[in-house]
Image: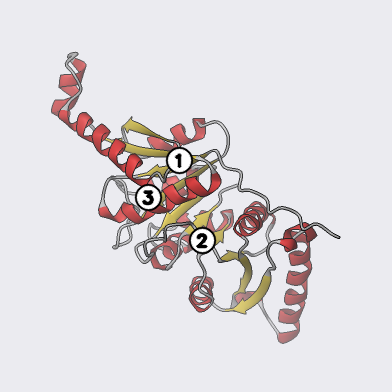
Amino acid sequence: MTMKPERPELSLDYVVFATDFSGHSEVAGQYAGLFAQYSGARLVAMHSFIPLRPAITVEMEGFTSTEQRHTAEKNLEEVAARLAPAETRWQTVLLEGEPAEMVARIEQLPGSSLLVMGTQGKGRIQHHLIGSTAEDLLRSVTCPVMTVGPNVLTPGKTLTFRNILYATDFSPEAMQAAVYAVTLAQAFGAHLHILNVLTLDEVGSVDELHAKQRAFHRELNKLVPDEARAFMEPSSYVELGEVRERILEHAKAHRIDLIVVGPRSIEKVRMPFGRGLTYRLIAEAECPVMTLRQ
């Protein structure tokens, strides 16, 4: 009798939830807590604040912590305690300075990390963001980032990803994201949708389109190892059109629970803020979007 292999576990040491205590970050925080519970990781609630000038003077003169710092510490403790499911380890990290300070602290964490953050309804990534800070966070951290947009509903009591969409162009830079998408699908027993969107500029004729489709399927077979198929069966799709529109349409039509995109998409966030592919996906998607820089 052939024994079915055990489903691989998701290897994750820290889930970092970056918060500004706004209502917009609450749904992201719930995802962070559930992700920590599912993976057995430690939940790290992180907040960055800029001291008011009077507060800086008080603390430099050796007095006790200012009310601003004390309030931030108290709020952060309450957030972490509320979001961490039972038996989930948690800690808080309060940073002084711009939210970009979070990047350095996250990079210092030993082991593997996932950063979770939310967005406001009008499209600015949450935190105290000034200018392109959110853009910098998405481009700068080396760990995966799961961003929960304004159209994402509150998750259930347990974390369930039944359908995961991996959007790829099969470039060499996209392979790391591909490995992560397959790993997630295995860990959650999800149906993995692998989508390659071709623009009109990339396809000159029907024969060329068919050739690209055949190449796509060859790459797909390399991407998903035989052992992974014991837990998830991938479906491949080649579509023609505008990338963002096709991804969002596919996600809605197939009830996708998580979209995964790779580094080439993240680089497009360098466009004027709010116009890049990844940013627009985050702002419009009805599910979280996970980005991988490397």
Would you call the spot at circle 3 few (<14 residues within 10 Å), some (14-19), or many (20 or more)?
many
Instruction: State which mark lies toward you, 1 or 3.
Output: 1
Distance from the alpha carbon under mark 3 to that under mark 2? 16 Å
Q: Amino acid at mark 1?
A: Thr
For label 2, the SS is loop
Q: Earlier in the sequence, mark 1 or mark 3?
A: 3
Position of 89 relative to 54 (above/below): below
Identity of the residue drawn at 51% across and 62% down: 258
Would you call the spot at circle 2 few (<14 residues within 10 Å), some (14-19), or many (20 or more)?
some
Would you call the spot at circle 1 few (<14 residues within 10 Å), some (14-19), or many (20 or more)?
some
Q: Residue furthest top?
A: 62
Q: Amino acid at mark 3?
A: Gly
For label 1, the SS is loop
Q: Residue furthest bottom?
A: 206
Q: Earlier in the sequence, mark 3 or mark 2?
A: 3
Residue 223 is drawn in which quadrant?
A: bottom right
Q: What residue does disc 3 label? A: 29
Q: Position of residue 80 (x, y in %)?
A: 35, 40
Q: Is residue 52 left or right of residue 135?
A: left
